[in-house]
Structures are given as structure tokens and as C-alpha cells.
Image: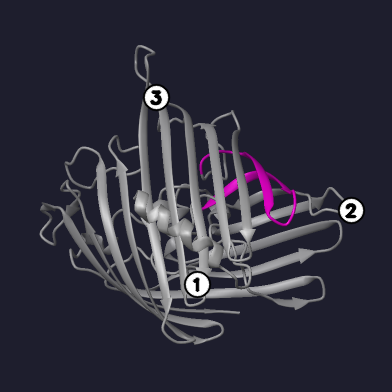
């Protein structure tokens, strides 16, 4: 791992292309401008085959593209954005299996909102904004919008941190290289709060040049609820990098979380989980590229992932290879193979027996406007 980071930093001075976007947030919607209103949309379809053939057709341990052996819609949305010199508003209703799985705890029509927020500009000269409502989450280097990423599937990293947040966000750019964000939140991916204390999140972006981005996030909040009465404060931090050079693109993310719990006699203990991943993409032609990912996720106390088998805690590696064909400027086809392997028997065979491996083959067609 030390050598990997060493080589990444050696490449930084040679980057010299157009500024990259932060793929860790879902603000990167394409749209058509109609006066002060921007209108856009996306349809992400997929077919996945899990060779373990899970019963019920729901693949375990994921919320994105999670159905087995069926053609389905992962995510479809309409993006509406309004902005003038003083105020702005963003509304993104969404549908698909991603919404069904990831918003299952939300009630009523709230589960169909990817983003719904309004903002007020606080400065005449600088882009200092306060936004309130359902916001995109900055945590990890992947969002729910597959077209923005080097691989089609999401890694373990974003599947087990908030994809969305509800609260207030203060955006303060310091200069062209540094930007900061403060979040006052209802909780860890919660539109309706489960308890009274509000949570706090922070985000810092650093762009040393036009082709590289460093992002550091934190989260602190009380996770007590009726379902988790022993849970107390949760601490979380992640760091990721996104960069590109000519035909090469790469991103890497590491994070660690700590969950405080209290037992029946009031004694406090700490549970930890964490992950690391790296993704690389090489453009063979203007429209064809190949990408690969390696990752590791560990959650020994099942704070985020409860194994579907009798295994104690969750731990898994994953490797992926993906073929990417950009059919046009607003359409992409992908074919990906993803292999999971664990030192523990956290997966199930087609006969229901605990095993250490799982394999996924998945095809995708996404069109946006």
C-alpha cells in the first residue's frame, strides 16, 4: 500500500488536462438550459447474473443494481435546477431498484427524492451559499450516478455510507484551489430524524491543479434509535483522490468509522469498520476504455454489514474488470465482471451453503440528457 501511494504522488506533477469533477457527489447532472431553469434526466438499465444464484433474486450486501437474473432499472431521474443571482433550487425525483433498496427506511413520497433543496447566496462577490433540504452526500469517491464513474458497479465503500443527506449545507470557497463545506444533518442517511440531537459533517476539497482533486470528509452524530438502543456517537472520516492524465484515470478512497455503544450496565465500548479501494481506467480509443478495481472492506462487529450466514462479522475483498463503450456523447454501454472473496464464509452458494466466494457478471446501458 505504501508503494501504491508513492507512485500516485509521483504522477501528480505531470497532470495537465481540463479540470475534473468530484464524482463523490451527485451534483454532476447533465441538463438543457431554458432561461434560468435547467432540465435533465437519466435512465440506467442493467442485467446482472450472480453465479451463486441468490433466492428471491436480491443480491446481498448492495443497494445499487442489486437484482439477479432480471432486466431492470437501477435508477431513472428527472433533474430540475433553478438559479438566479440570489437564490437557487434543485429537485431530482428518482425511481428504480436503487431507490427501492436504498430508501427503504424512508416514509411515503420522501423515498423518491434524490435531491430536493433550496439555497440562498450570502455574498455578492463570492459563491458562499446556504442550502437546505435533501442534499447530495460527499462521502467516498462514488455517488449513485453510474455514468460519472470508471466502473459500472459501486464498490463496498459508498454502499455503506450515506448516499444522501438531509439538513443544511454551508458552502465557502476560499480560492480556486480550496473549498470547504459544513453540514448540519438529521443523521446518517436519514431524511426524518430518529432522535433529537442533530449531526455534523464537514468536507474540504483541494485542487492543486486542473487534473487532480483531494477530498476529506468527517461525520459526528448520535445514532441512538428505537431499533439500535445501545448505539451512541458515531465518528467517521474518509479521504479520496481523483486524477487523470491523458488516457489514464484513477481514483482511490480510504475510510474508517467508529461506533460507540453502551451495554445494559452503562459501560461504553467502541466498534470499528473501514475500507480501501483503488480504481483505474485506460482509454483505448475515444469511445472505448477498460477499467479495473481492487478493494477491501472489514466490519468485524457488523456495524454496517450483518452477514447472511452464521459468520461473525463481515470481511471481504473484491476485484473487478469492466469494458466501457461510449455509444454517443450521452449514452454508454458497460460489461463488468466482479469477483468477491473472503477469509470468512459470508456468501451463500446456490444451494444455500455458506461459502467464501461470489461472482457477478453484469451488463448496463445508460442514457442521459
Residue 133 inside the magenta-drawn segment: no
According to the image, label 1 marks what residue? 147
Alpha carbon distance from label 2 to label 1 = 34 Å
How many other residues sit within 10 Å of disc 1, few (<14), some (14-19) or many (≥20)? many
Alpha carbon distance from label 1 to label 3 = 38 Å
| Residues under numbered marks 1 and 3 in contact, where contact means CB atoms less than 8 Å apart | no
Q: Quadrant of residue 341?
A: bottom left
Instruction: Judge whether residue 84 can be spotted in this image.
Output: yes
| Residue 160 % position (x, y) | 41, 48
Viewer-side residue, 140 vs 87: 140
Q: Is residue 310 above or below residue 342?
A: above
Name the magenta segment's main secondary structure.
strand
Viewer-side residue, 177 vs 157: 177
Q: Residue at x 13, y 59 (%)?
A: 349
The dot on residue 261 is: 3
Q: Residue at x 44, y 62 (%)?
A: 98
Q: Nearer the viewer, mark 2 or mark 3?
A: 2
Amino acid at each position: 500500500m505504501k508503494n501504491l501511494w508513492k507512485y500516485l504522488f509521483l504522477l501528480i506533477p505531470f497532470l495537465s488536462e481540463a479540470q475534473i469533477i468530484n464524482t463523490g457527489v451527485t451534483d454532476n447532472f447533465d441538463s438543457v438550459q431554458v432561461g434560468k431553469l435547467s432540465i435533465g434526466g437519466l435512465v440506467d438499465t442493467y442485467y446482472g447474473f450472480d453465479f451463486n444464484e441468490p433466492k428471491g433474486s436480491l443480491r446481498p450486501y448492495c443497494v445499487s443494481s442489486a437484482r439477479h437474473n432480471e432486466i431492470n432499472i437501477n435508477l431513472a431521474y428527472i433533474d430540475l435546477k433553478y438559479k438566479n443571482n440570489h437564490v437557487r433550487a434543485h429537485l431530482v425525483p428518482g425511481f428504480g431498484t436503487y431507490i427501492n433498496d436504498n430508501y427503504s427506511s424512508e416514509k411515503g413520497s420522501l423515498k423518491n427524492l434524490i435531491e430536493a433543496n433550496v439555497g440562498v447566496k450570502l455574498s455578492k462577490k463570492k459563491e458562499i451559499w446556504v442550502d437546505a433540504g435533501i442534499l447530495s452526500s460527499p462521502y467516498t469517491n462514488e455517488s449513485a450516478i453510474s455514468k460519472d464513474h470508471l466502473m459500472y458497479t459501486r464498490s463496498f465503500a459508498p454502499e455503506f455510507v450515506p448516499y444522501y443527506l438531509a439538513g443544511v449545507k454551508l458552502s465557502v470557497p476560499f480560492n480556486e484551489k480550496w473549498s470547504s463545506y459544513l453540514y448540519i444533518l438529521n443523521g446518517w442517511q436519514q431524511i426524518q430524524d430518529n432522535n433529537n440531537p442533530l449531526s455534523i459533517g464537514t468536507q474540504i476539497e483541494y485542487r492543486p491543479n486542473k487534473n487532480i482533486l483531494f477530498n476529506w470528509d468527517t461525520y459526528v452524530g448520535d445514532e441512538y434509535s428505537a431499533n439500535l438502543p445501545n448505539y451512541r456517537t458515531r465518528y467517521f472520516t474518509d479521504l479520496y483522490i481523483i486524477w487523470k492524465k491523458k488516457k489514464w484515470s484513477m481514483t482511490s478512497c480510504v475510510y474508517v468509522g467508529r461506533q460507540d455503544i453502551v451495554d445494559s450496565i452503562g459501560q461504553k465500548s467502541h466498534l470499528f469498520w473501514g475500507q480501501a479501494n483503488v480504481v483505474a481506467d485506460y482509454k483505448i480509443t475515444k469511445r472505448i476504455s477498460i477499467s479495473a478495481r481492487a478493494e477491501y472492506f472489514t466490519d468485524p462487529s457488523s456495524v454496517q454489514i450483518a452477514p447472511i450466514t452464521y459468520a461473525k462479522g463481515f470481511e471481504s475483498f473484491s476485484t473487478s474488470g469492466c469494458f466501457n463503450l461510449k455509444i454517443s456523447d450521452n449514452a454508454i454501454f458497460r460489461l463488468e465482471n466482479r469477483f468477491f472473496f473472503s477469509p470468512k464464509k459470508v456468501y451463500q452458494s446456490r444451494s444455500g451453503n455458506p461459502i467464501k466466494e461470489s461472482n457477478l457478471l453484469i451488463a448496463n446501458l445508460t442514457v442521459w440528457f
